[in-house]
Image (spheres, coloured by chain):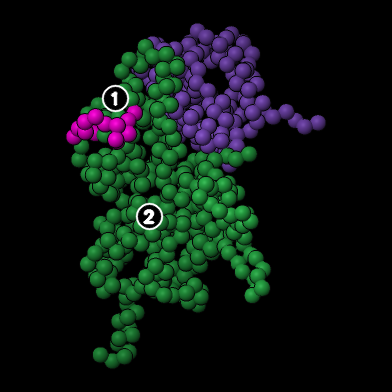
Amino acid sequence: MKEEFEPNILGFLCNWCSYAGADLAGTSRIKYPPNIKSIRVMCSGRVDTVFILEALRKGADGVLIAGCHPGDCHYQSGNYKTNRRIKLLKNFLKDMGVEPERVRFEYVSASEGQKFAAVVTDFVNELKKIGPSPIKE
Amino acid sequence: MSKEKKKSELKKKLQLAFYWAASCGGCEIAVLDIDEKILDVINIADILFWPVAIDIKYKDVEAMEDNHIDVCFFNGAIRTEEQEHIAKLLRKKSKILVSFGACAVHGGIPGLGNVANKQQIFDVAYLNNPSTDNPKKIIPKTSVNVKEGKLTLPDFYDTVKTLDQTVDVDYYLPGCPPTPDQIMTAVGAIAENKLPPKGSIIGPMKSVCDECRFEKTEKKIKEIKRVYELDKFEEKCLLEQGIICLGPATRGGCDARCLDANMPCTGCGGPTPNSLDQGAKMMSGLASILGIEGEEKMSEEEIQELIDQVVDPIGTFYKYTLPSSIINRRIIK
């Protein structure tokens, strides 16, 4: 039998909300798929579109960017910028024939361990349907 | 002067070669744009090979010893088998190979062909074009037998490549085309043997904004405009007026000539130093300044509408750099 495709996900989690949310998921022993490798960034606004494209080229099948809810950004407006940035990147990916669903931006607060687990689970299921990144080296 | 002496003097001259691959010919004109300085160049150099200007055949280059050419300026991207063959040949025959102009360095306008493949391009060029009359559906083939014998054409590739994706390159001179000053800097460095380390891009370490005459303040864009849509042209940063200008993401060296003509930078200088992907950098930057005012009150749909004002992300952000960017071609299934 052919082995099921296990997507590789890179997560950029903001220090103030989403990384703490992922931590909470861990300390609360909530189960979620182990496909995500998390990188803590100080703000989701730090995530350059170059990082996302480079991740998709260097082995990630999907990239999750998680930041604070609107209005909660520790730096006032980083998450707004990222929201727009991801939308623009998705338009570009669509034009390039790369599934825009491979990039996901979510708001996860420090108290939303449950949501973080749900987001990762859903993302893994979706990527299993789409398959490996077509731009992987 | 004895014949011997004349010969030894000739030998001291730099042996130059120029070639064009997938390009428009503007780079060749740029070489002539150095005006009377071309005489200085001729004083120090012999031109051995330049299909645009002198009549020398490929077989003459093939007959040269390896490393016979001192410096070869190669412009244009690699799109066909012939271009690849000549790139490899000139690499072998040249001591220094300079990737000249946006097409050779980053893929350039021909590189935008990477949104399609050979079949799609041939379909448009030879079959499904309103102005094309081709009832026998004839498309170019690499070889065809006619009664006089076999005719061949070089193969046309699916993907456009940059010169350094094809052969080893020593120096890069970006720009569409490189400006006369940049060319003279390069020629001067070669003549005086003051060349930077191999792999250097001959250009400043700063962006086009550094050379631009317009006053720059904090950037906020409400909506994206094209140049003709401006009600009133103001003497200030074009980005601040809502025009997409790739200046911040583009390496300078051009003295911001387009800006001098009140037109935005479209990015021919390629990415700024240490930047992997010019288009992605500009996308990041533009998204950060677009719709800042009242951003906290905007609904998701309003934000999407704002972003959708960028109608052609590939053509806008990757006009000259698609083959050398992180995603170098459209994925066609």
Residue A61, position in %: x, y? Answer: 59, 31
Magenta range is B224-237
Please tell me in which quadrant of the rendered image residue B241 appears: top left
Q: Is A40 inside the magenta-drawn segment? A: no
Q: From the image, tell me which residue sits under label 1.
A: B220
Q: Amino acid at mark 2?
A: Gly
Residue B133, position in %: x, y? Answer: 55, 53
- The reply to whether residue A10 is in sight is no
- Chain shown purple: that is A
The disc at residue B181 is none
Describe the element under mark 1 as helix, strand or loop: loop
Q: Chain ID for label 2?
A: B
Residue depicted at x 18% and y 34%: B235
Total marks shown come to 2
Q: Amino acid at mark 1?
A: Lys
Is the residue marked by circle 2 packed among few (<14), some (14-19), or many (20+) residues within 10 Å? many
Magenta stretch: helix, strand or loop mostly? loop
The disc at residue B101 is 2
Q: CA distance from mark 1 to mark 2?
A: 33 Å
Instruction: Say which colour chain B has.
Output: green
Q: Quadrant of the N terminus of chain A?
A: top right
Q: Chain ID for label 1?
A: B
Q: Image height check: is B161 above or below A56?
A: below
Q: Quadrant of the C terminus of chain A?
A: top right
